[in-house]
Image (cartoon, rainbow, N blue to C red):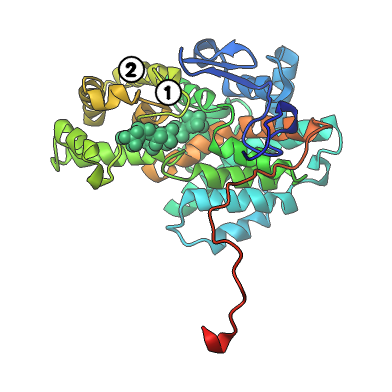
Amino acid sequence: STGLITLDDGYANTGSCSSAITFIDGENGILRYRGVPIEDLAVNSSFIETAELLIFGELPDEEERAEFRSLLTENSALHQDMGKHFDGFPTNAHPMSILSAMISALQSHDLPEHQFTDANGFREAAASLIAKTRTIAAASYKSHVGQPIIYPRYDLNYAENFLHMMFSVPYRDYEATPEEAHALNMFLVLHADHEQNCSTSTVRMVASSGANLYASVSAGVNALWGPLHGGANMQVIEMLERIRQGAMTTRDYVARVKDRKSGAKLMGFGHRVYRNFDPRARILKDAADRLLDAMHVTDPLLDIARELEQVALADDYFVSRRLYPNVDFYSGIILRAIGIPVDMFTVMFAIGRTPGWIAHWKEVTDNPRQRIYRPRQVYTGPELSPWVPRDER
Ligand code: SDX
């Protein structure tokens, strides 16, 4: 045994903790943020309302919403010295490497009052990090395409401002359509938190040592980067593209996945917790349909994704292993339709997940009984071994 799990010690010995932020029922496909069903939030909530719900524990009233929104806009600009970090990255640097490095660097550049010594300081720090994550992502894109950084406008909401910061140029503002902005807002709401997933557990692990918010969230960005976690949304598009380019049919690809020697996975399928369906995947599938209809465009990758889902869900290999589409299977179709480059898909996941990471950092930091996470192990190495002098080895 690796020691008893006691909910209050938060991984003190091994992987289990108590949390009041997000509830998941994997058997019945239920996901709630602070008790509010994800289906209601996806349709009705702005991303910032959802962020406040996760971080402060309840949906904001009009005054709180307006105040937090202005905090976001006021704190969107990066310190001038942060620009020097951008210059140091090669233009082909992966956006996730830029994001994790820049969030860590923020600790040195962000305003001292954001060192969250009190509730107001934390409120500003949370707004500052959510705002600057968006600015860093858009700025890394602008740096990549050789265009000047565009700062947010007061009259736009978070999703509209992101598209403005990505696609406006000094001589012409990009006006996102209501459908694009709504789809991106929904994407961000659906990614805002997800209980003790790999990257959030990483944030909690780092926070348990007493590390600051920026260091903890930067670690979460790196955990999210992996292809089995947040990196899957990029892999799904690459998988669908391979099928579209005629390399193989959907049936061929499913057969390849079932042949374990290939090592191929059906990316965007499967989940440790959801054993029937991921409610986010259902919402994103419908949203992709609606967005493409509203834009009067079709995307062959969406047709392939639907066919792949049908073929897989008629195949006992997947059904017997309870493998269903997860949040990453359809999300990339929406990002593609909006014009987000594929190499930024995982960054989009990180922008969405930032409020959840902040909420979990706060929950760990505020817990007076929180102990440092120190998982135990089952030792499988050699028994006692004598020292062998070098000339006898
Ligand atoms: C996210 O935890 C979270 O909440 C994460 C997340 C969040 O919001 O934070 O929901 C976001 O990370 C979603 C997952 C994105 N990743 C992918 O889509 C990558 C493809 N999926 C798999 O790698 C896998 O399903 C995981 C990583 C998602 C879950 O891994 P598990 O729980 O360790 O599952 P497993 O490897 O134990 O699989 C059980 C069986 C195995 O077969 P057997 O050895 O029993 O014969 O199912 C097979 C696996 O080989 N399997 C798959 C598969 N996923 C599992 N086979 C083919 N394709 C897949 N996608």
Between circles 2 and 1, the one closer to the viewer is 2
Location of residue 332 in the rendering, given as x and y in whole percent from the top left corner: 37, 32
* Earlier sequence position, callout 2 versus callout 1: 1
What residue sits 30% from the left and 39% below the top?
Answer: 265
Q: Can you tell me which quadrant of the image ligand 1 is in?
A: top left
Residue at coordinates 24% horizontally, 38% vertically from top-left?
257
Is any part of residue 116 visible from this angle?
Answer: yes
List x then y, in percent, for residue 372.
75, 42
Q: Is residue 241 above or below residue 180?
A: below
- Residue 15 shown left or right of residue 284 in the figure: right
- Crowding around mark 2 (Cα neighbors within 10 Å: few <14, some 14 to 19, many 20+) is few
**Which residue is at the far bottom?**
391
Identify whether 84 is placed above or below 336. below
For label 1, the residue is: 177
Q: Is residue 363 left or right of residue 135?
A: right
Q: Nearer the viewer, residue 67 or 381?
A: 381
Q: Which residue is mark 2?
A: 294
Residue type at tag 1: Thr
Q: Amino acid at mark 2?
A: Ala
Tell me, for residue 249, which label it has, or none: none
**What whole-number distance in Å separates the C-alpha atoms at marks 2 and 1?**
10 Å
Judged from the image, the secondary structure of the residue bearing numbered disc 2 is: helix
Instruction: Return the residue nearer the eye: 216 or 275.
Output: 275
- The number of callouts visible is 2
Contact between labelled residues 1 and 2, with CB atoms less than 8 Å apart = yes
Q: Quadrant of residue 385?
A: bottom right
Q: Tell whether 119 sits left or right of 43.
A: right
Quick one: SS at disc 1?
Answer: loop
